[in-house]
Amino acid sequence: MINFYQKYRPTNLSSIIGQSHITNILLKASAHDQLATAYIFQGSRGIGKTSISKILAKAYNCLNKKDGDVCNQCSACELINENKSQDIYELDAATNNGVDEIRKIIDAINYAPMNLSKKVYILDEAHMLSNGAWNALLKTLEEPPKHVVFIFATTEFHKIPLTVVSRCQSFNFKKLDKDDLVDVLKNVVKQEKIKIEDSAIDKIADFASGSARDGLSILQQLAYDKNKKITVEKINETFGLINLEIKLEFLELINQHDLEKFVKLLNEIEAKGTNFVLFIQDLLAILIDLLVYQKVKSSSLLKVLDEEQVKAINLKNIKLLSLSEKINGLLSTRVSQTNIKESLLLAVFDYLEQNPQPVVGNNVEVVIKPKTKTTEQIQEKEEAKPQVEIKQKNENEKVVKVEQPNEQLKAKKVRSLPSEETESSTKSTTNDQLDLSLDPTKAKDYLKAIIFSVWKNSKLINKELQKNFLNAQEKFKKGDNKEDSFYENVDLYLTGSKVLTVTDKAAIVLLEDENVAELLNEQNYNNSKVHTINHIFDKEIYVFAVTKEVMKPIFEQTQKIKDLDIINYYNDLYQSLDVDKLRAIKKQKTQAEILSELLDK
């Protein structure tokens, strides 16, 4: 059985598709008998280099050329078409690349042609010739006999010595456009009476990547049973291809940082016998389409997706350029490895580690940006871990708010002498009140511990508590909650604030005023403060109030954490936030409850 790409190989220059920039020049040169004595045809596989070489061999010898093109009817053309001429030599330079083979050619060129006017030597994969072989050819290329022509075909032009290039005319062959390739396939389908869907022809054209030979080989492989219609599903099954929906799902899981589903999908793709090299090439093509549209907003430049598909894809958490570089690097360095699937997995993990998931709060998104170069060392490792202590409040000490002339709020501890009225009414209760304090020198460490924990495990984020905060804030703005007035500093927590992140243990609240943040960030958890926090979040948790300016360097320092001991330190620090102790404090009566009891008496 003759291969389709041989059976339907073009026989004249006019029938060549997709290389008009070359055929037009050769036709004019042939028409005026100005064809060169040596050519280099460069380009990827299966795009017409060998076909034009064979046609050109006929053009040198055709007896009845018309407008420079061959007639395919004269004795010379018929001899070449039937491969019966001894004056046309085709040499595979990949296997015959030594000096000895070239010397045999040099010895033979001095003899006159046997049945044609020109001897034509076609050397395929010419870049595989050794330096010695090229050197042996130089003199012949510079001063060839009038009856000798050389045509070199190569896929790696850069490997051809410059001394050879300067002695030849070079033509750069381009890959076939999809439309041209579809036309080639449809012509063969019609001639062979193959049953195939139009979408399947498009799929083959995409799969062939601009190579007519590859496209015809694929079509012939699928057309073994002409009674069965060729479908896209059959193509995917035969060649281990993945449809576009799965590729987009693959990228969406990266976008969501859902590693569990990502690994499962990758395993499912592998179980289908997928060609991972082609899969990775397709992923890169999709990413490039998205990048191109993002930059220039032109649908005419898209190669894989259409404009509607691009607009429907939402990969807001993916840095397209960074991921594209990762995938491209994978193709250039690992395609020959048998563990290409594992290489893809590691490449994605590496990308996600360098581009961590944003820490999302209520209408706030802060991304921890990776630092590739750092000169500072983290000193927290050498510092002692914070001590959490519960102590009795001094009955003569209390926290009061002082309103400054510039209306900035500050906290000051002042001593007040007990009056007879207050001492008699509160002595029995204040002496029993507990005050839980975190080490104030470790406030930033706690922030790092919370951010680090949430960054490593996004499941720690408690969306219910975020919702509770928003509800409390909304009611406060409308004045719908009369209970707000009974809770200390509730207005400061809910005015102009946003929750950066919140877990079952702690919350980070962003504020604009650094003085308010300083006041709320005092880590002394007394009865009133715990009740206020519970009123806002409906749960006893630790609250850290900061400004965005304070958080920025904390994010940067958190990203530098690599040392295992430091990681363990922050893990332990986060776990040390014991909410059970806050619950114990909350069980005590609030000042409002005490006052209510006194009034009842």
Image (spheres, rainbow, N blue to C red):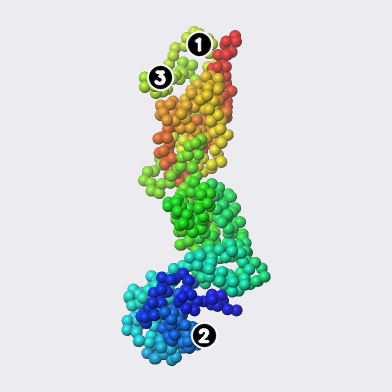
Q: Which mark is residue 171?
A: none
Residue type, label 2: Glu
Q: Where is residue 587, by image quadrant?
A: top right
Q: Residue at x 56, y 71 (%)?
A: 187
Q: Which mark is residue 422?
A: 1
Image quadrant in which the N terminus is located: bottom right
Residue that numbered label 3 is attached to:
403
Judging depth in this view, the residue of 179 and 101 nearest the camera is 179
Residue that numbered label 2 is attached to:
82
Residue type, label 1: Thr
Instruction: State which mark lies toward you, 3 or 2.
Output: 2
Mark before the other along the chain sequence, 3 or 2: 2
Judging depth in this view, the residue of 438 and 351 nearest the camera is 351
Q: Percent x, y for residue 26?
A: 40, 76
Residues at badges 1 and 2 in contact (C-beta under 8 Å)?
no
Counting other residues with Cα less than 10 Å from the Cα at mark 3, is it few (<14), some (14-19), or many (20 or more)? few
Q: Percent x, y for residue 117?
A: 41, 88
Q: Where is residue 266, by image quadrant?
A: bottom right
Residues at badges 3 and 2 in contact (C-beta under 8 Å)?
no
Mark before the other along the chain sequence, 3 or 1: 3
